[in-house]
Each structure stands twice: as structure tokens, then as C-alpha cells.
Amino acid sequence: MKYIVTLNGKKYEVEVENGNATAVYAGKADEMKAAPAEAAAPTPAAAAPAPAPAAAVPAGAGDPVKSPMPGTLLDVRVTKGQAVKEGEVLFILEAMKMENEIVAPKAGTITSVTVEKGASIQTDQVLATLQ
């Protein structure tokens, strides 16, 4: 499916096929033919597919430690049964080329770790449980 997208006054022709998109500069804005009305607004087909929701019930008892943003998990610094202090770094999450520390919201014991290093993480995904 082809779309005409305007970005910073330049029009681009975007072709989306099986979730892959390619874009080509289409020339000056006044040289372009008028794009169909549905092409002016992005459609769900042009967006990345939505990730599957995280499990509703975390494994282990206690309060969930959730990711505040989407990203890639670079490091897991805790294991099940480990005692942690409030503010201790539990995970390192890369988001937008920045390393973000996910810290313990309170002192306690890790009752489960639900992710592993290298995993793709979504906002509000449960990373561990803390009791």
C-alpha cells in the first residue's frame, strides 16, 4: 500500500508491505499531485505492530517492579531470593540510546524475576516482584 507523507514541508512516498516500509523523496511539495484524504493521516497498517500484553499475574508474591518505559534490557542485577535495599539498582534498561537504572522502590526480597538480559521490554511490563 502506498501513502504520501509530508514531513517538514517535503513529501515522501511511503510503501508499506508486510510490516516493512520504504520511503522515497517525492520532490517539491508544489510538484506533487494531491494525495488521497486517507493518505494524509497515518493508518494502523503503517504503524509498527502492537506487542503482546505482558502476563497479568506476575510469578511470585509481593509488589511488582514495572518498567517505566519501553526498551531493551541490558543487565539483570538481581536473582530470586536476593535481599535488596531501597534504591538499589535492579535492572539496566536501554531506551533511546540511554542507559536507565531501574531501582528497588523499597527494601525487601526479590520473589521472582520475570525477564532476562537482552529482552525487549514494554512500558508497565513486570520485571520482578519484591516482598
Image (cartoon, rainbow, N blue to C red):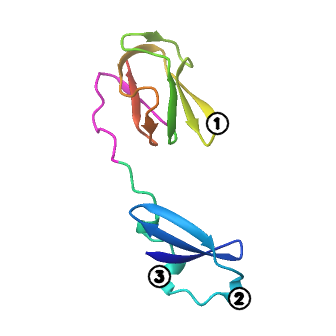
Q: Callout 3, which amino acid?
A: Glu
Q: What element carries label 3?
A: helix
As measured in the structure, the alpha-carbon distance from the residue carrying label 1 to the one carrying label 3 is 36 Å
Residue appearing at x 49%, y 20% in the figure: 106
Mark 2, other Cα within 10 Å: few <14 / some 14–19 / many ≥20: few
* Mark 2 vs 3, N-terminal side: 2
126 lies above or below 14: above
Which one is earlier in the sequence, the residue at label 1 or at label 3? 3
Which kind of residue does numbered mark 1 sit on?
A: Met
For the magenta stretch, what is the residue range?
52-67
Q: Which element is circle 2 on? A: helix
Front: mark 2 or 3: 2
Residue 104, relative to residue 108: is it above or below?
A: below
Which residue matches tag 2? 30
Say the numbered circle drawn on residue 98. 1
Magenta highlight on residue 57: yes
Find residue 7 and report its horizontal and vertical position in percent. Answer: 66, 71
Q: Spatial distance from mark 2 to mark 3, Cα to Cα?
A: 19 Å
Residue type for callout 2: Asp
